[in-house]
């Protein structure tokens, strides 16, 4: 018996409908299983447990504002002893570390040439003085002759001019004597300030020129730190503010005070140089490196520890606990400061007493349920 064509077509349609229904039921079952898996995952996330030290509350506190500073210590009073005259260096007996007093003779330049120059200048001055005496006697004689009518008035004027010229030559010769005496005196190398020898730059027997550096003297009584600050930070700096420094080799912190602030910025870097005086601490030396903090004032602000403010997003944020879940709250940061040895930063965008996760907890996904450990407040 031949099956009608329309029955065959109808059967195929019914079969296709059955396959579609089966597929729809299978997809719904898969979606249901995925939803159940997601809910199970969320239930697992709810097991995040936090200790008492993992949560802190945002509070308004008084911050001690500070700026980081660093630099090398430098003596306020230091000087180079330079040669004022040329010659062979003699009798330079001081060495690095020796103490000297202001005005002390620490060495000499060979005086033979300068003693000869002084004698020459003195002899020239004596000759000039003799010429003055001769011209004066001639003038006195000519005055008598004019009064007696033996010579003309013009001859007397000539004698007067000769006296004037001789006296001028004598004064010039005396000035040369003074210059020669000054050069002889300058052969003695004297310490301009009291302190210690930091560098010995030449040795005995060397021939040195004018302005040659011989030794460097450093007065360790008053040292200062030269620190470069950003132009914006320098506005907060005022004379008299205190700083605490850690100096290499020193076990205890060293106190410093702002002595002066440069009125101009440094070309290129646009930084401002601030000078700190460091006194009353034995053992400090020029060149030691120091770093520390400058206290610039106090401020009242809602603040958190710096590590609690996260920066792995385009804008800073904190992990804020809201209704038992983690929320990523964007904040605006402000001034930084210290309180009880902890560096805090001002935040805006949180309420007083808001619960925030500390930085040591790490990053938790937003919406993660959290709870406190049993027995913890």
Image: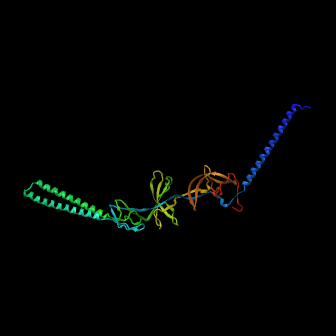
The residue lying at 18 percent from left, 58 percent from top is 166
Q: How many marks?
A: 0
Compare residues 230 and 63 and report the one nearer the observer.
230
Most distant residue in the front direction: 205
Compare residues 70 and 289 and report the one nearer the observer.
289
The residue lying at 78 percent from left, 46 percent from top is 30
The part of the image, by quadrant, that contains residue 51 is: bottom right
Q: If the image is split into quadrants, where does the N terminus sit?
A: top right
Above-or-below relation of 39 to 373: above
Q: Position of residue 217 (x, y in %)?
A: 40, 64
Q: If the image is split into quadrants, where does the C terminus sit?
A: bottom right
The residue lying at 12 percent from left, 56 percent from top is 156
Q: Position of residue 215 (x, y in %)?
A: 39, 63
Compare residues 226 and 185 and report the one nearer the observer.
185
The residue lying at 17 percent from left, 58 percent from top is 163
Residue 52 relative to residue 261: left or right: right
Q: Position of residue 27 (x, y in %)?
A: 78, 44
Above-or-below relation of 230 to 25: below
């Amino acid at each position: 018996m031949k099956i009608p064509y329309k029955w065959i077509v109808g059967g195929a349609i019914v079969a296709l409908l059955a396959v579609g229904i089966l597929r729809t039921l299978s997809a719904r079952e898969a979606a249901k299983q995925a939803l159940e898996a997601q809910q199970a995952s969320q239930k697992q996330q709810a097991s995040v447990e936090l200790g008492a030290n993992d949560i802190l509350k945002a509070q308004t506190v008084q911050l001690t504002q500070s700026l980081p500073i660093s630099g090398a210590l430098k003596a306020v009073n230091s000087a180079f002893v330079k040669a004022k005259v040329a010659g062979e260096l003699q009798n330079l007996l001081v060495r690095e570390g020796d103490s000297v007093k202001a005005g002390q003779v620490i060495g000499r330049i060979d005086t033979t040439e300068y003693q000869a120059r002084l004698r020459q200048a003195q002899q020239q001055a004596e000759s000039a003085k003799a010429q003055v005496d001769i011209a004066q006697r001639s003038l006195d004689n000519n005055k008598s002759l004019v009064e007696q009518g033996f010579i003309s008035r013009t001859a007397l004027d000539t004698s007067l001019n000769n006296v004037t010229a001789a006296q001028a030559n004598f004064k010039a010769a005396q000035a040369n004597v003074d210059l020669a005496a000054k050069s002889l005196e300058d052969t003695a190398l004297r310490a301009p300030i009291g302190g210690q020898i930091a560098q010995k730059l030449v040795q005995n027997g060397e021939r040195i020129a004018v302005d040659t550096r011989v030794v460097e003297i450093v007065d360790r009584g008053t040292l200062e730190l030269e620190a470069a600050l950003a132009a914006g930070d320098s506005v907060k700096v005022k004379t008299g503010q205190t700083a605490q420094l850690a100096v290499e080799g020193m076990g205890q912190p060293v106190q410093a005070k702002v002595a002066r602030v440069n009125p101009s910025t440094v070309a290129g870097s646009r930084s401002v140089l601030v000078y700190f005086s460091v006194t009353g601490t034995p053992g400090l030396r020029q060149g030691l490196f120091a770093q520390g903090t400058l206290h610039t004032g106090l401020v009242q602000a809602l603040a958190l520890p710096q590590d609690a403010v996260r920066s792995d997003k385009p804008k800073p944020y904190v992990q804020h606990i809201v209704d038992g879940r983690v929320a990523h709250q964007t904040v605006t940061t402000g001034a930084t400061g210290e309180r009880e040895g902890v560096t805090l930063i001002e935040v805006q965008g949180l309420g007083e007493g808001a619960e925030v996760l500390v930085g040591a907890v790490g990053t938790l996904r937003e919406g993660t349920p959290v709870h406190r450990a049993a027995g913890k407040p």
